[in-house]
Image (cartoon, grey):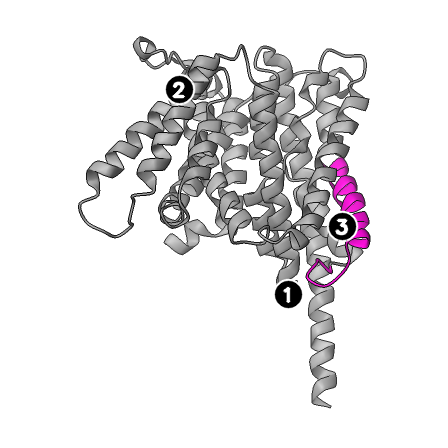
Amino acid sequence: MQALVRSPRFSAVALLTAAVLGLVVANSPLGPGLEHLLDAHAPWAAVGLDLSVAHWISDGLLAVFFLLVAIELKHELVAGELANPRTAVIPAIAAVGGVLVPAGIYLVVTTGTPYQHGWPIPTATDIAFALGVLAVFGRGLPSTLRVFLLALAVLDDLIAIVIIAVVFARDTDFGALVGAGVAVALFWVLARRLQPGRRGQGPLIAGLLVLGVLTWWLVYHSGVHATIAGVALGLVLPRRPGHVLHERVEPWSNAIVLPVFAFASAAVVLPSVGLGQLSPTFWAVVIALPVGKVLGITLFGSIATRAFRGPGRSTLSFWSIVTVGVLGGIGFTVSLLMNELAFARNAEVLDEGVLAVLVGSGIAIVASAVVVSLRARQYRARHELSEAEATE
């Protein structure tokens, strides 16, 4: 059961199922009740946390997901595929292209409108979904393609973290931010004393939990999005405790955190307007996610491959980079969060943005399934031919 929940295939199916279910329920007779539930406020105002259920999910629950992202990012930077600058430079450049081109397309489509601040929405790649599609349809593909996709998606997450921390900060309270920094430092000091598997560490773990919650509370009050607390804590965790935490929490994240977020984010009422009446944001995201990602990743990745070709560097072919680019168009989780942050004060455009992320990512999922399947079939045929020639 643990192996199933950890698999990229399970994560992708769970995310898609939850999103579709949220959309269906929101447009059914149960829709008003669901909207009332998500808008309900928990009675925690006494501690400065007057959040709706929907915000508890996006600000609180999703911090767990970003904690795991940060742990994985640190592993890749310290001991993984990104530890060697020679192997990291090509996916890094491709990731930058996968951010700049979709953002540029979004800005072009929304020129002259008040919606241009939504440019970060199509810049994200959903690492769980992309790897899930690759696992389902990519049997026979070389491991180098998965490694390249993983490195690119991790770097994409890093860029997304920076965008969330910088672009979407609101009325920054530097006192609270400094307090969060102190709490993170204390968390790091205690975490260095952790020895996974050793008895008698209950008080130490309890102290880390208190500091983790305190960090989240201070980041929330600082005006920076609260999920950044998860990022900070994940980055300062030593590798071994971080690995243990990731192993224990990942099944819960895949089975509960991400599906609940996808369900709540996708629970929007379909607008009763014609296609021509949809806002430019809808069309910008629908185009920029599946088209902008593949163009940006392919263009920048191909240029980087030519410029930095050599021993120890990626040897992916042009069509393999195209395959990764198509997979990169699956925005989903982080794109939904970006949309919520960009249009939190405009409910109509917010809902259209959600639909655009679902449609754009859906197009990318279908395109990825076709492209990955074709590439996998080519590789399997080539491998079978090589085996046949070897036996002659």
Disc 3 is placed on an element classified as helix
Instruction: Verify CB contact (< 8 Å) between mark 1 and mark 3.
Output: no
The mark closer to the camera, 1 or 3, is 3
Instruction: Verify CB contact (< 8 Å) between mark 2 and mark 1.
Output: no
Q: Going 58% across and 37% down the picture, which residue do you hit?
A: 157
Instruction: Say which residue label 2 marks.
Output: 179
The answer to which of marks 3 and 2 sits earlier in the sequence is 2
In the image, residue 123 above or below residue 271? below
* Total count of labels: 3
Is residue 176 something that shows in the picture? Answer: yes
Question: What segment is highlighted magenta in the picture?
Answer: 290-315
**Spatial distance from mark 3 to mark 2, Cα to Cα?**
45 Å
Q: Position of residue 272 (x, y in %)?
A: 66, 16
Q: Position of residue 61 (x, y in %)?
A: 41, 29
Quarter of the image that includes the C terminus: bottom right
Instruction: Say which residue label 3 marks.
Output: 322
Instruction: Say which residue label 1 marks.
Output: 140
